[in-house]
Image (spheres, grey):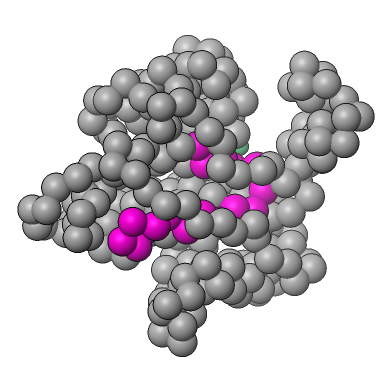
Amino acid sequence: MTTSPSIQIRAVGLTDKGQGRERNEDAYLVDDARGLFLVADGMGGRKGGGVASQAVVKHLPDLLNDRLRHGPARRTLALRDAVFDLNATIRKVGEQGSGLRGMGTTLACILIHGRTAYVANMGDSRIYRWRDGLTCLTQDHSLTALLLREGEISARSAACHPARGQLTRYVGMEQDIYPDVRSERIRPGDRFLLCTDGLWNVLPDSTIARLLGAGTEPASVCSSLVEAAKAAESQDNITCVVVACGTTESRSRIRRPSVYSATEGMR
Ligand code: CA
């Protein structure tokens, strides 16, 4: 738990291998001290996916620190440039490891400072905000999302389209590329959900809204969301981070970052 002058943040992450996968290639980070929260959904090769998503958790905090050192007042740019740097870093990790070439990962992250949430994404992991209703703050970088936006396919056919899952932007891709970045003023009571497609693919917005807006503790919201995705027969890895923004002036103890990685489990 951490405090800013008037916003208290409570955040919890949870991941589940799901029923249809041998490995969990998702990863997440809950770092209260930095105000940094992320989910990553790795892909590529026998072991590349898990390595890529773990490398995001390992490298993004330091890359962000480096960028913030040079321009702490310009967090939108710092986050954008840190993810740009991350793309090259993940590519390098892939080139150096055996069987890792071509690996990649999605990224959905929030950096919270004061009353502002800085949001960045690459790929099709999503960030939702609950505030008297559900809003998706990210746009998927996938072929089906592109076809949907262009009016080429319907939402119904997108769900079972053969190109489903093909990403137009991700971390680790060959091109030097920036993420989408935006900043949002936080209001007390806001709740953010970061999740991989193993969750949002099987849960309708109405279910996500009901569970995220229920007002219960973030840990309980995470459990409810993951259980709902399993009950909806998600065949993918399922990962979510819930960030609840409250209003207390009291100071509280900063926890160690909570990190999940497929090879090391919770640490
Ligand atoms: Ca996935």
Judge whether residue 239 can be spotted in this image. yes
Position in image of residue 172 (x %, y %): 68, 63
Q: Quadrant of residue 65?
A: bottom left
Asked if residue 55 lies left or right of residue 227, the reply is right
Instruction: Name the residue at 25% across, 25% down.
Output: 216
**Residue 191 spot, x, y in % from top left:** 36, 37
Q: Is residue 230 visible?
A: no
Asked if residue 169 lies in the magenta stretch, the reply is no
- Inspect the magenta stretch and tell me whether residue 120 lies in it: yes
Report ligand 1 position as a quadrant: top right
At which x and y percent is residue 15?
42, 36
* Magenta stretch in the rendered image: 112-128
Q: Residue furthest bottom?
A: 70
Apparent side of residue 106 relative to residue 264 in the rendered image (left or right):
right
Instruction: Residue 231 in the image: state x and y as whole percent.
Output: 47, 12
Residue 51 higher or lower than 9, as above or below: below
